[in-house]
Amino acid sequence: MPFAEGTTVSVAKSRAEIESLVSKYGATRFAGGWTETGAAINFVANNRLVRFSLPLPTKDNKRVRARALRLSRTNYSIDQAALDRAIDEETRRRWRCLLLAIKSKLEVVETGIETFEQAFLANIVTTENITVYERIKLEESGVRMLPAAEAGG
């Protein structure tokens, strides 16, 4: 069973728990926002801006469709009410997963297993206003992360 499946905790409560958690571990700023397709939270801790992006489920998501089919009144098609309910359930579950991910990283740092930079590297925002992970993905697509060394220099 996936983590937090069936949770009834609201998105607002999970977001508030994340804000409280990062504050408890020393964050000095916090912001969050959302669009139709995703949500993001940002916080500043250890003099680093950190961003977590959370893709939100859609009606085409495999897990959503399977759950909606189980919730539908028939076994042959998915009704809109069941689809909406399945999307809401998956959205709540994903927010709980995000809380768990951030909490585990902060605890790993607090325990001394990793430094803050080691634990959060992929989510640290660069001077280009993208995360280190997004920057690495750009390099993989042919945009160099670092400039080439000058010949003869």
Image (cartoon, grey):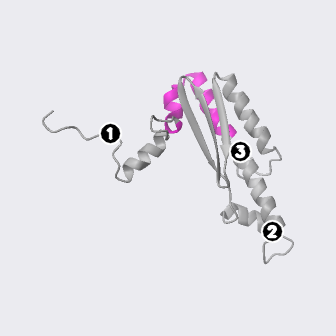
Asked if residue 114 shows in the view, the reply is no
**Closest to the observer: 77 or 19?**
19
Residue placed at 51% from the left, 34% from the top? 124
**Closest to the observer: 140 or 29?**
29
**Closest to the observer: 75 or 10?**
10
Determine the image quadrant of residue 15. top right
| Mark 2 Cα-neighbour bin, 10 Å: few <14, some 14–19, many ≥20 | few
| Mark 3 Cα-neighbour bin, 10 Å: few <14, some 14–19, many ≥20 | many
Percent from the top left, x then y, of residue 10? 81, 44
Q: Is residue 49 left or right of residue 19?
A: left
Name the residue that disc number 2 marks: 80
Give the magenta part as a residue range.
99-123
Name the residue that disc number 1 marks: 146
Amino acid on which disc 2 is placed: Gln
Name the residue furthest left.
152
Q: Nearer the viewer, mark 2 or mark 3?
A: 2
Q: Nearer the viewer, mark 1 or mark 3?
A: 1
Decide whether residue 64 is among the magenta residues.
Answer: no
